[in-house]
Image: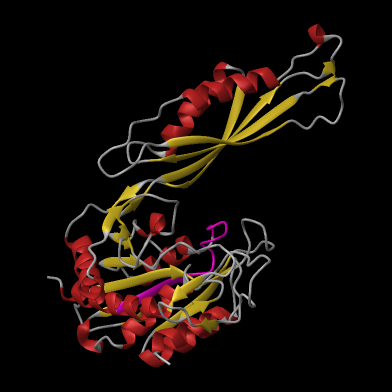
Amino acid sequence: MNRTLDFAKRLIAAPSVTPARGPVFDAMEAMLAPLGFDVHRFIAGEGEDGSEDAPVENLFAIRPGPEGSRHFAFAGHLDVVPAGEGWTSAPFEPVIRPSPGGDLLYGRGAVDMKGAIAAMVAAVAELPRDAGTVSFIVTGDEEGHAQHGTRALIDHMRAAGHAPDLCLVGEPTSVNRLGDMMKIGRRGSTIVTLDVEGREGHVAYPHLADNPIPRLVAILAELDAMVLDEGNDWFQPSNLEVLDITVDNPSSNVIPHLAQARVSVRFNSQHSGAEIGARIRQVAERHGGRTRQKIYGEAFLTPPGAFSAMIADAVEAETGLRPEPSTTGGTSDARFLRDLCPVIEFGLTNATMHKRDEVVAVEDLETLSRIYRRVALAALARD
């Protein structure tokens, strides 16, 4: 069995539904320690599971290179989304099945993203110790609330004086074939809750009440018609979507006193989360509403340059493809890591992530490991 496949199977076999703790990190530490890494694990968060303050395990591992050498970081997450029903085999029991195109590895996390982390560790196992400093930034809270994961790891690294020069995140960025896309940035994300208060009353006496629903509908109509921008060279247009409308009114003859809604905005680099929130608040206040906002991440871009060229060169050398630089898709922990150093995402094909029977081609795992080794060597050798 090749090293990458062995590592991937060991990680998949450790159930780690978000927020992840314990066995999956035991497996990760057991892989890294023999390679000379100093492994630091800690728990952040003190709430109950399911809450935004739920305890999360994090891991930072570092293998120092020669004094003054460059520092390259691999980053990712070991937590996974719930498996759900309908799998053809147990989701946390890795299974190899043959196919006309080669063997396939099934299991929750095979693609998102235990397979990529296995490829990273296998890549470092082939990396000369004197090449430079290498680290792993790994959380158990990327698929969840992301409150005590990578952000806590960044605080830990800063306190210890560890500052990578470059960071590669192993999210599954490829679309149709391994190597066809990398992410050089991501849109920002915010959710705004709208509260419109009225005054309850009998439906037969509307002059004695104030129905908040028409005002909420007017707010949503204005927001839905709002054009935030037309996009730019690297980002698609920002989009606002209505997520839900809530009126807690079980009665058929009472005008309610409160109507609420939530809107989600994925915004590009032309905006900040605070600016988006202010625009929505202005619309709401014109109709007598209030807003509550949560910003999950700001838009960011790692402009094409030496780092993206390193990744593209490595991918092309192993696959013959030159990955398209993109900022499409959802958010990732790269939105936090960009505060440490330039960050780019590259990983496996994403067709089966978060689905039943999540699967990765065994050959892709080995190819990805070779790509990661090439990237690390180039990053550490860079002047």
Quadrant (top left/top right/bottom left/bottom right) for the C terminus: bottom left
Identity of the residue drawn at 66% across and 65% down: 84
Residue 353 vs residue 379, the one in the foreground = 353
Q: Is residue 237 left or right of residue 370?
A: right
Judge whether residue 359 can be spotted in this image.
yes
> What residue is at 57 percent from the left and 25 percent from the top?
220
Q: In x, y percent, where is residue 68?
A: 19, 77
Q: Is residue 1 left or right of residue 211?
A: left
Tell me the residue at 48%/33% (across/down): 277
- Relative to 37, is 58 above or below? above
Tally of numbered discs = 0
Residue shown at 51% from the left, 62% from the top = 142
Q: Is residue 337 above or below residue 207?
A: below
**Which x, y percent locates residue 36?**
36, 90
Indicate the quadrant where residue 118 lies.
bottom left
Residue 242 location, x and y as percent?
57, 34
> Can you say which quadrant of the picture contains the N terminus?
bottom left
Looking at the image, residue 238 sits to the left or right of residue 243; the answer is left
The question of residue 238 being in magenta is answered with no
